[in-house]
Image (cartoon, rainbow, N blue to C red):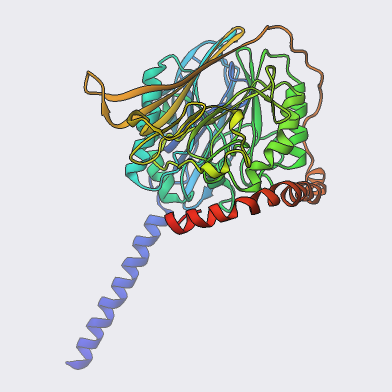
């Protein structure tokens, strides 16, 4: 009887083990789920005729992209690969028709996404786009707040053709966070063209996430592990996107790439998008990586007559007057730190004023933080405005020789007369210029070989170190007591 019981138990145990293995086998080797998720449509090459697409599936399946009305288009699929437990699909479409709205689906042979849409550049001299930065969320609630800000941006500018996201999409770049990002942004991402910029949270120490989330033209990128630098023309503007994770901010090869890239265009407007900001009064405005840009990068921007620089990283809105050589200059570059579309907002560190960022540089400063909003009015940043408590978005409109920039706050709490969340225009400026003046002075190969890149690693670090020890450190030591005071009072640097 005892033996029979033991045998019966053994049979049950073996059957359980076999069944478990069988079930695992079915799960691992079966068809799985071919439903596409994390769908994005990105700028990739010439936005009048091409786009890049990325989507993920749980199953290893064939990539299928269908674009209605694009009979002559050429689609190139990248090989599907496994990444963090999912399968990544990327495709580039070329030979589209300029100035056309397209509808598309992505997926597999059997399962397709909801339709998405995008519009190609009509190549005339007017364009409209939206700019946001630093959603940097890690909870469902905060991703939703970021998505609300982006939706409010498109409600304010329904004619926007694309959105520039200045980086820090998530906080830790984990699978869970990208799923939450996708949960909040899926419809938004599917229905516009995204110009993504790598933030430090998307790049440093979380290698390959950025290029695996967004299908970009990496042909001229100096490296791709921690972000991507690329450029494109849209209307009469030339855009260069920088990767400020490159050797902690920017390597010498990337600076060379930018100089050639900007000298290679005859477009009327030259615009640079990047994550870290050289001018800021937020808590990151005291570290040498971003501040080094005011030494190294601005030299190139000045030489190439860049009109507008947009950046993020420091979770506050700040616009400078036109600057050249770190001095006020009517024909200089305007720098915009584009606020945060998310809910993590940084206080002004007033002790940084005139140490690293001179107050005479600042045209507008809007603080979105906490239970109040500080507003820089040229002399004081202690005035309070409740309307500034919310997510920040920006719109840019270019018409020939006029560029109009507007910044807005979507209030967390206040509502308008229709009961909708209040949208307040917190900054507005225009830049005008004579068109048809820019001439391309560079042509040819602007790629960087691996050998050239690695040969320049030490010189790049030495340039950063020289700045750090000779210019940054003396100023930092001077303000160090303030930093310690803030740390004691607020438990944060
Ligand atoms: Fe950042």
Residue 80 in sight here = no
Residue 452 in the figure: left or right of residue 322: right
Task: Please state which of residues 395 and 43 is positioned toward the viewer in this rendering.
Answer: 395
Residue 271, x across and y down, in percent:
63, 23
Residue 472, x across and y down, in percent:
69, 48
Residue 299 in the figure: left or right of residue 390: right
Q: Residue furthest left?
A: 1
Which of the 4 image quadrants contains residue 329? top right
Task: Please state which of residues 224 and 100 is positioned toward the viewer in this rendering.
Answer: 224
Residue 366, x across and y down, in percent:
45, 31
Q: Residue at x 40, y 39 (%)?
A: 369
Task: Please state which of residues 350 and 323 is positioned toward the viewer in this rendering.
Answer: 350
Task: Please state which of residues 197 and 360 is positioned toward the viewer in this rendering.
Answer: 360
Q: Residue at x 44, y 43 (%)?
A: 57
Residue 74, x across and y down, in percent:
59, 22
Which of the 4 image quadrants contains residue 424? top left
Which of the 4 image quadrants contains residue 344? top left
Q: Is residue 123 above or below residue 361?
A: above
Q: Residue furthest bottom?
A: 2
Residue 387 in sight here = yes
Q: Residue at x 56, y 51 (%)?
A: 206
Residue 419 in the figure: left or right of residue 485: left
Total numbered badges shown on the rendered structure: 0
Q: Quadrant of the N terminus?
A: bottom left
């Amino acid at each position: 009887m005892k033996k029979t019981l033991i045998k019966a138990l053994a049979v049950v145990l073996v059957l359980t083990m076999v069944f478990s293995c069988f079930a695992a086998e079915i799960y691992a080797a079966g068809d799985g789920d071919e439903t596409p998720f994390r769908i994005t449509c990105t700028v990739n090459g010439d936005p009048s005729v091409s786009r890049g697409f990325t989507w993920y599936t749980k199953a290893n399946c064939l990539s299928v992209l269908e674009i209605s009305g694009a009979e002559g288009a050429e689609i190139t699929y990248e090989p599907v690969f496994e990444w963090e437990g999912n399968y990544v699909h990327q495709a580039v479409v070329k030979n589209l028709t300029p100035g056309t709205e397209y509808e598309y689906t992505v997926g597999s042979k059997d399962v397709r996404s909801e339709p998405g849409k995008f519009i190609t550049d009509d190549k005339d001299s007017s364009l409209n786009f939206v700019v946001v930065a630093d959603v940097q969320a890690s909870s469902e609630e905060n991703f939703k707040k970021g998505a609300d800000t982006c939706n409010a941006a498109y409600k304010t500018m329904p004619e926007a053709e694309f959105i520039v996201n200045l980086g820090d999409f998530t906080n830790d770049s984990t699978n869970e966070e990208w799923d939450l990002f996708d949960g909040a942004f899926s419809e938004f991402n599917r229905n516009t063209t995204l110009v993504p910029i790598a933030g430090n949270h998307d790049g440093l120490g979380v290698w390959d996430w950025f290029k695996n989330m967004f299908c970009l033209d990496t042909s001229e990128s100096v490296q791709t592990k921690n972000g991507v630098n690329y450029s494109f023309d849209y209307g009469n503007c030339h855009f260069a996107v920088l990767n400020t994770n490159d050797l902690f901010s920017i390597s010498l090869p990337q600076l060379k790439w930018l100089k050639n890239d900007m000298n290679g265009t005859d477009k009327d407007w030259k615009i640079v998008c990047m994550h870290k900001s050289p001018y800021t009064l937020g808590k990151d405005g005291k570290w040498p990586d971003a501040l080094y840009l005011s030494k190294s990068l601005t030299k190139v921007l000045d030489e190439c007559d860049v009109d507008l620089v947009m950046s993020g990283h420091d979770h506050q809105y700040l616009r400078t007057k036109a600057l050249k050589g770190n001095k006020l200059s009517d024909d200089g570059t305007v720098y915009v730190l584009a606020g945060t579309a998310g809910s993590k907002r940084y206080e002004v560190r007033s002790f940084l004023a005139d140490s690293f960022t001179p107050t005479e540089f600042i045209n507008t400063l809007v603080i979105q933080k906490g239970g109040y909003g500080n507003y820089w009015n040229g002399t004081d940043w202690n005035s309070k405005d409740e309307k500034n408590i919310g997510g920040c978005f920006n719109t840019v409109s270019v018409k020939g020789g006029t560029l109009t920039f507007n910044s807005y706050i979507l209030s967390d709490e206040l509502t308008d007369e229709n009961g909708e969340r209040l949208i307040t225009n917190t900054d507005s400026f225009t830049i005008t210029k004579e068109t048809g003046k820019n001439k391309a002075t560079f042509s040819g190969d602007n790629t960087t070989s691996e050998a050239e890149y690695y040969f320049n690693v030490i010189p790049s670090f030495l340039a950063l170190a020289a700045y750090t020890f000779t210019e940054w450190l003396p100023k930092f030591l001077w303000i160090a007591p303030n930093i310690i005071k803030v740390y004691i009072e607020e438990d944060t640097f």
